[in-house]
Amino acid sequence: MIQSSAESAIIENCKTGKLRHQEIFYKHFYGYAMGICLRYAYTRTDASEMLNDSFLKVFRNLKKYDEKLPFRAWFRKIIVNTAIDYYRKNARLLPTLEIEEAENYSFDINLIDNLNYEAIKKLLDELPELHRLVFNLYEIEGFTHQEIAGKLDLTESTSRSYLTRAKKKLRILVEKYFETEYERKIRT
C-alpha cells in the first residue's frame, strides 16, 4: 500500500513529539495495528497491551524511520516484534498443551472460503500459544524457520514441528467447525 500524503503528514507531525499529533497518529493507525495484534493475542486485553506497547515503541523510534521504506511495513515489524516480546515475557504464565496426533482426515479445502474473520480468529485461538505464534510468523508474516528460531530461541526443527502441529490441529478444528455448522443448519 502506497502511503498517502495525508498519512505522510500525520507521520511527520508525530515526529514533533506533541501529544496532540501522537493522538491523531494513534487514532489513524489504531485499526491497522489492532488487527495485527489480535492475530497474536488470545484476548482483546492482551491485544490492547501489545498495541499500546507497539505505539510507545513507534513514538520513541519514529525519528529513526527511513521514509524511503513503506511505513506500514516498518510499523508492522514493530508490532510483530512487540507480540514476540509479549509472548516471551508471559510464556511462563501460559498453560502448555500437547496436541494429540492428528488422524488423516479427508478435507475439502474449498470450505475455508466460507470462513469469516471471527471464525478464523476463534479457530486460531484454540491453538496452544507457541503453535499459534509460529503459525502467524511463518504463514502470515512470511518469516523463515531460521528467523523464527532466532526470535523465539528455538531450533529450526522445533519451529517446523510447531508449524506442522498447528496445521494438523487447524485441519481438525476446521472440520469440526463445519460439522457443527452443518448440524446447526439441519436443526433449523
Image: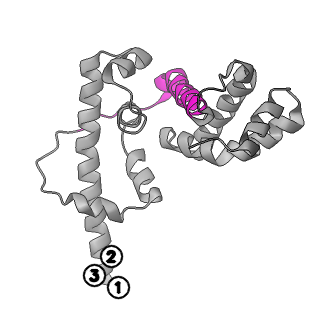
Q: Residue 50's spot in the image, x, y percent?
A: 61, 33
Q: 16 or 138, which is in the foreground?
A: 16
Q: Amino acid at mark 3?
A: Ile
Residue at which label 1 appears: 188
Q: Amino acid at mark 1?
A: Thr
Q: Residue 160's spot in the image, x, y percent?
A: 25, 27
Q: Residue 182's spot in the image, x, y percent?
A: 27, 73
Q: 95 or 45, which is in the foreground?
A: 45
**Disc 1 + disc 2, Cβ < 8 Å:** yes
Residue visible at 27% across and 74% down?
183
With 4 as the anchor, is 138 left or right in this view? left
**Residue 153 belongs to the span the image colors magenta:** no
Range drawn in magenta: 73-99
Residue visible at 64% across and 36% down?
51
Q: CA distance from mark 3 to mark 1?
A: 6 Å
**Disc 3 + disc 2, Cβ < 8 Å:** yes
Q: CA distance from mark 1 to mark 2?
A: 7 Å
Helix, strand or loop status at disc 2: helix
Residue at which label 3 appears: 186
Residue visible at 40% across and 14% down?
150
Q: How many marks?
A: 3
Q: Amino acid at mark 2?
A: Arg
Q: Residue 128's spot in the image, x, y percent?
A: 37, 37
